[in-house]
Image (spheres, rainbow, N blue to C red):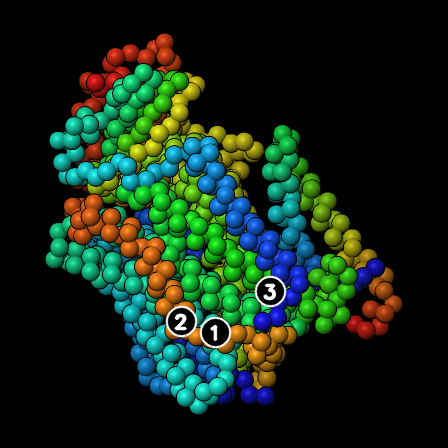
Amino acid sequence: MRRMSPALFLVLVAFTVPVAVELRTVAGFFGVDLPFVAVVIVELLLLAAITAVYVLGRIYPDDDEASTT
Amino acid sequence: MEIHKYEKVWLAGALLLIVGLIATVSYGAVGAGIEMVGDEGGQVDPASLDEHPKFGEPGTYQTGEDEYDVYVIAQQFSFEPGTSEPIRVPADSTVTLHVTSADVIHGFEVVGTNANTMAVPGQVATITIEVDEPGEYGLLCNEYCGSAHHAMEGSLEVVPQSEWNESMVVN
Amino acid sequence: MATFVDRFPEEAKVVQASFAVAFIALGIGALFGVVQALHRTDFLRIIDSVDYYTLLTAHGVLLALVFTIFFLVGLFTWAVARSFDRPLPDIRLTWAWFGLMTTGATLAAVAILAGLFPEIPMSADVLYTFYAPLQAHPIFYIGLAMFIIGTWMAGADWFLAYREWRGENPDDRIPLQAFMVLTTMIMWFVSTIGVAVSVVFFLIPWSLGLIETVNPLLTRTLFWYFGHPVVYFWLMPAYLLWYTVLPKLAGGRLFSDPLARVVFVLFVLLSTPVGIHHQYLDPGIAEGFKFIAMTNTMFLLLPSLLTAFTVVASVEHGARQRGGEGYLRWLGALPWRDPAFTGMALAGLMFAAGGFSGMINAGMNINYLIHNTLWVPGHFHMTVGTAVALTMMAGTYWLLPQLTGKTVYSRPIGLLQVVLWFVGMVFMSNAMHRGGLLGIPRRTAEPQYQNFDFATAVGSVGEIQAQIALGGVLLFLSVVIFLFNVAATWAQDRVDTPVDDRIPEPLSSSSGAPLVLDNLALWTAIAVVLVVLAYTLPLASIVTDGGLLGNSPAFPVSISVQPVVDAALSTLESAAPGVPIDVHSTDAAVDRLTEVIR
């Protein structure tokens, strides 16, 4: 896995917020009314995904990257 | 001057977007006939509105079959008519709103619609709206007009044709 | 290696002083901002709704005028001294304009804040647009006039520096940063004539009682003659940083110097003849004039779209220099740890979103749906409130070390601060846009009405309110962290190399730019001609229709609203008995009006 810097991790986490909030608006355009809980769940899923990539990148860094950083 | 190939493509796209935006508005104005606030309303003296032939007695005037003029005065902090009694118009009619202000600059917004204009003292704003289904709409001032601005509100009532009667028009 | 403060110690002091004023205004303005966000959403009401408008006026004036413009004069002073590589002609002139601007801003702020104290007979609750015939205390207008004249003197200072430099370098191209400063100031000189005429010839004499009446449409049109270019006056410092500093922070260099010049020339030409697009809904201005303003406005998208390309291309180049690869993977190679870079990148991204909502505002007919609704502050909190403000805060993390010789107190805290701003603004401006589509008005202490509710398509009004309140709190928190970080930086000890302040040459250098781009006199002349074409007829018809001085007497925003409320109550009560109406709603309206009396 590619190693992710803590700063990039923080910025990506910030980006999940508008994505989760606006997903509901987009669903609304297509006539699907998601409850507010759905936003929370989507946000948690996104956070889990990013955290997983971050942690995996720390545990199994690519060989060349591990040697340079 | 050296311009990168991708940048030329981007420039062309940008110009297309701009021309497209202007074209849609032009189509809306000419093709779909969306009327916008212009200078047709003319001028009035804000200090002597009560001597004005129409604003002297603001309200709904019938001007033709299914055609009405509504004269509204905005003032700190009410609409007349609108606040103490609703603006009343019949369903399925064409209504021209004439809005002016007796004191400072106000806004006139029928909530949830695009019937929206500024009320500037000395000027008369006119907007023509097509009224269909009966119903009640909120009316609010959307330009800061003084310390009780947030209390300036009213309503517009679209009355069913069957309930429409003489007492609802001024003339 | 010597940085700015070592080479230009006198100029560095002026820039630091300007930034200090800007940051004080930012702190006060942000505090009022969060109070308003909580008040209008009905989460926490610690002030009277009457005082809401005092805070709103202060919020607008302190942030949109004082914070942005003081940062601008500081940044431009830095850019002029740095890029001409010479001190300013006479530092006393520099301190003179700083003093005049600060005095003017303080007078205006005092006049506004006096409105919070009923015992002081002074008030300026006219909001930052100060539309007559609402009338503020004369000190407010006088302060604004002094502030504007101060900015003119600052412009003159930089043009004098240009003249000295030109004397010694007759054949050189104007350095890019100086070119940006000079073109921005030309735009400013042309556009502030409107507000200066309005304030000096009409509003000051009128507030002093020397003239009885004003023509409200005329002063309003003169305000907007200035009111749109001022938007670009806020934006140009951000563009200066995006073009000349951001590519360097990303690890590369600017893509094209000539195109940067083209963009700034376009802003000189097109910024002013567009102001009527703020008046699409005004009576007394013919549709044709509004259409011309709209066409110009749409073409003004062009320089911003070009900027988007150049800036993204420069940043991508930087990422590839740092070893980034792939179509999108290079994004991961950017220096996200650097708050200056991350802040500017997030600001630029949000500017793209704000630009799209601006296209809706600019559309003459769709504008009717959102005019004066919450959509509009939603839009400008993305543009001036993020593209400009966040870029300025981010830029501070790179500039302050050069100005003080001290390293930034904490870069991780800085990173957290810019990210917090981004998240807070996503919540707030997104909810404001949606609220605006429902018709919720802007500039209102209590957007909760007796007669009706706002109908929502998706979600609920309560949710929108909660997002606005949450966003407002996060933004305020971000400002507090920023101010702490800046103060702590100022308190550090000086070091030898506080920051890498080199700016590499652009990939396509200025030698490829046509010489005509540097012909400032030509662009000024064309800009003036365009303004004359766009404004002569509308202004002539406004004056012919309503008279130069009009017929609107003053409506002072006095400390007491008692007389007005009494008049409104008597109208309501006299209307009530004779008319077949819902008595309950009248009573409610009466109660509502009575509430506002202190």
For marks 3 and 1 on the same chain, the one whose residue lies earlier in the sequence: 3
| Rendering coords of residue A13 (x, y %) | 67, 53
Total tally of numbered discs in the picture: 3
Badge 1 amino acid: Val
Q: Give the secondary structure at mark 1.
A: helix
* Residue B122 numbered mark, or none: none
Check disc 2: other Cα within 10 Å, few if <14, some if 14-19, many if 20+: few
Task: Give the camera-side residue of A5 and C545.
Answer: C545
For marks 1 and 2 on the same chain, the one whose residue lies earlier in the sequence: 1
Check disc 1: other Cα within 10 Å, few if <14, some if 14-19, many if 20+: few
Q: Please, is residue C562 above or below residue C110 in the view?
A: above
Which residue in the protein does label 2 denote? Answer: C522
| Rendering coords of residue C132 (x, y %) | 24, 50
Q: Give the secondary structure at mark 3.
A: helix
| Rendering coords of residue B139 (x, y %) | 35, 31
Q: Nearer the viewer, mark 3 or mark 2?
A: 2
The CA distance from mark 1 to mark 2 is 8 Å
| Rendering coords of residue C23 (x, y %) | 43, 67
Q: Residue at x 34, y 64 (%)?
A: C528
Which residue in the protein does label 1 denote? Answer: C516
Badge 3 amino acid: Val
Which residue in the protein does label 3 denote? Answer: C311
Q: Nearer the viewer, mark 3 or mark 1?
A: 1
Instruction: Residue lying at the far right in this picture: please name it.
Output: A63
